Image: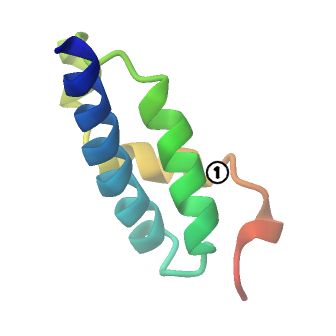
Amino acid sequence: MAVVSLENNVKLYSSELKNALLKASNYKLDEQIAYSVAEVYARNLDYSDPELMHVGVTSVANNLLTRIKREYFRV
């Protein structure tokens, strides 16, 4: 049962983070790259840590955008 819950958490969080990445980049980030980055981040997140869960996806997206290579942006 814990596996299903974890997969649901990953799916939900990665979807929200992908949308936040696209919005924070003014939709200049390639959508597939946003999805890939969001999924990797969501799979490595500790969902049991309440402090990490308190950080909003917009803050995470803004932080991640500084680390994404500029070639992944559509200009």
Q: Residue sitting at 45 percent across and 51 percent down? A: 61
Where residue 63 sits in the image (x, y, percent)?
51, 44
Q: Position of residue 4 (x, y in %)?
A: 23, 25
The number of callouts visible is: 1
Compared with 18, 48 (above or below) is above
Q: Is residue 12 above or below residue 3?
A: below
Location of the C terminus (image quadrant): bottom right
Left or right: residue 6 versus residue 38 is: left
- Residue extending farthest to the right is 71
**Residue at horizontal 16%, vertical 15%?**
1
Where 39 sits versus 20, above or below? above
- The residue depicted at 34 percent of the width and 36 percent of the height is 10
Depth check, front residue: 48 or 23: 48
Q: Secondary structure at mark 1?
A: loop
Q: Give the quadrant of residue 42.
A: top left
Query: Which residue position is annotated with label 1?
Result: 66
Amino acid carrying mark 1 in the image: Thr
Colour convention of the picture: rainbow
Q: On the image, which quarter does residue 52 sit in?
A: top left
Q: Nearer the viewer, residue 32 or 51?
A: 32
Is residue 3 shown left or right of residue 14?
left
